[in-house]
Image (spheres, rainbow, N blue to C red):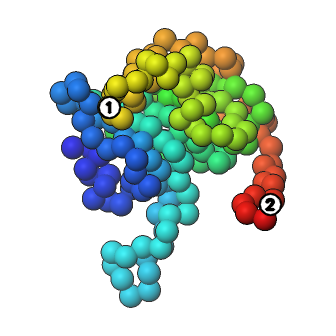
Amino acid sequence: MLLENYQNQGLLTVTLVNGQTTTAGVYAYRGDLVLKEGALREGSTTDRKPPTALFIHSALLIEGDKIKFINGLLPTLSLLPVFVEKYKADIASDCVALVYVENISKPLQVVLEGVSYQLLPFKEGLVWNELLEELYIEKSELKGQSAEDKVAIAYAAAKTYKAKGEVVSLAEAEAFTFIVVKDASVGAI
């Protein structure tokens, strides 16, 4: 099973959901997905330092060991090709990908390895809540559903989602990036 393989490789972290939906053979995951593993600790062949790059708050739907739905947050557009390179063998050709990117200024679409990635700007908030709002999914539609089935409901809605951005190359998309400045005044005072 794909998610089990990822777990064994240490690619899943901060896991919120990892299980089968009510549809046999369809699995859902929500959590952080490792893009760049940390270096091995000195003298170890298995123990790693924390990852250096993550696909944050990701949601995946897997059917037949292929990723059919991808959602989450990339801190920078430059991590999109990293994600694609690392996971391309597992991504279905008809995958629906709605990816929030922190450093883009407008919605865009980029096609990589035959899959169209719909890129959406992200300012703040919870990625999952932003996705539900973007797909016009009411909380009442999710009431009483398992956490895994909630991901399946998001996937079903995403299949009919009309992309807002123009199709551009990755190089052209880079023109719409900016440097994100984080506000340091967070936390208790």
Question: Does 66 sit above or below residue 167?
Answer: below
Question: Left or right of 69: which side holds 81?
Answer: right
Task: Report x, y in % for residue 150.
Answer: 39, 28
Q: Nearer the viewer, residue 157 or 81?
A: 157
Image quarter (top left, top right, bottom left or bottom right) of the N terminus: top left
Q: Which residue is mark 2?
A: 184
Look at label 2 and name its amino acid. Ala
Name the residue that disc number 1 marks: 146
Residue under the image location 58 percent in, 38 percent down: 127
Local secondary structure at mark 1: loop
Which mark lies nearer to you, 2 or 1?
A: 1
Viewed as shown, does residue 157 lie left or right of 133?
A: left
**Nearest the camera: 49 or 173?**
49
**Nearest the eye: 163 or 90:** 163
Residue at (70% x, 33% y) in the render = 121
- Density class for disc 1 (Cα within 10 Å; few <14, some 14-19, many ≥20) is some
Q: Which mark is residue 133?
A: none
Residue 174 image offset from top left, x and y in percent: 73, 38
Label 2 to label 1: alpha-carbon separation? 37 Å
Task: Say whether disc 2 or disc 1 marks the residue closer to the N-terminus.
Answer: 1
x, y percentage for residue 149? 33, 28
Q: What residue occupies the far left of the structure in this picture?
A: 24
Q: Amino acid at mark 1?
A: Ser
Relative to 101, is 85 on the left or the right? left
Q: Is residue 57 above or below residue 185?
A: above
Quadrant showing the C terminus: bottom right
Residue drawn 80% across and 49% down? Answer: 179
